[in-house]
Amino acid sequence: MNWDWMLPEPASNIGTEIDSIYYLILIITGAIFVLVEVALIVFLVRYRRRDGRRAEYSHGNKTAEVVWTVIPFILVLYIAYASNGVWLRAKEADRTGSAPTDAVPMRVTAKQFEWNVTYPGPDGRLDTADDFTERNRLNLPLDRAVRIELASEDVIHSFFLPDLRVKQDAVPGMVIPVWFEATKAGEYDWACAELCGLGHYRMRGSVTVHEAGGFERWQAEQTAAAAARAVPPEPTPSAEQTTPESEESA
């Protein structure tokens, strides 16, 4: 079942669970919407204006009021209970430090209107000499957890990877951990889901989930390229400098 109006196929370890909660809420709210609209039509027809019939005041029905208060209350509690496990796996693991220990560390810094991603080099650690940075490009390994330190330099942004079912606000003055595991190789969209200024519409990037071993090769290539750019060029003699041969000839 792959209808256009449904969510795209999930590409992360928590995607299926998040989708199940989404469709659960969709079914419950959709059923309530249909019931309310049917009741509205019934009331419009049954209590429509008729000749010879006077309007009457009704104080209400306590039984009906209790029913339509208790049922939504129970439904909300059930949704919260069903969502709790997914929330703990997707969010609390970041805060408690129980995310996978072998997760690849990355740092994503948002600012108007771009994303800057800092990757570790071969040593697998941030804030070392072999780190490198890419703008608006998020490269991920396949079937390996990633732990991102999310921050913002100016206003609130929202780190949103729709295909991977990842969404987290980036708040100025805070470093918010985000972890997930990509389970399907491919190219995906990356956007800011929080109105952050006039250029919000163009604050987007690309996500590449590499095949097995591809991320490590890409990481090594980028580290080597960054190291090459950091090497200062060989000094060239200025026009005023003279060689011994030129001095002797003079």
Image: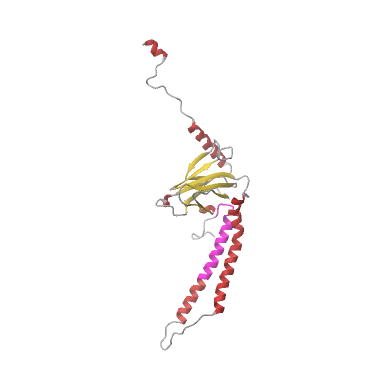
Say which quadrant the C terminus sits in. Answer: top left
Of residue 227 and residue 206, the one placed in the foreground of this image is 227
**Above/below status of 16 relative to 231:** below
Does residue 118 show up? Answer: yes
Left or right of 153? Residue 78 is right
Magenta extent: 10-33
Count of numbered labels shown in the rendering: 0
Percent position (x, y) of residue 40?
47, 76
Q: Is residue 29 magenta?
A: yes
Left or right of 125? Residue 47 is left
**Above/below status of 237 relative to 154:** above
Say which quadrant the N terminus sits in. Answer: bottom right
Of residue 193 and residue 189, the one placed in the foreground of this image is 193
Residue at figure coordinates x 57%, y 66% from the top left: 76
Does residue 211 show up? Answer: no
Percent position (x, y) of residue 248?
39, 10
Percent position (x, y) of residue 223?
53, 36
**Above/below status of 182 relative to 54:** above
Q: How is the image coloured?
A: secondary structure
Residue placed furthest toward the left: 250
Residue placed furthest toward the front: 173
Percent position (x, y) of residue 176?
54, 50
Q: Is residue 87 magenta?
A: no
Quadrant of residue 123 within the rendered picture: top right
Q: Main secondary structure of the magenta part?
A: helix
Residue at figure coordinates x 41%, y 13% from the top left: 245
Residue at figure coordinates x 61%, y 63% from the top left: 81
Left or right of 197? Residue 182 is right
Residue at figure coordinates x 42%, y 13% from the top left: 244
Of residue 164 and residue 111, the one placed in the foreground of this image is 111
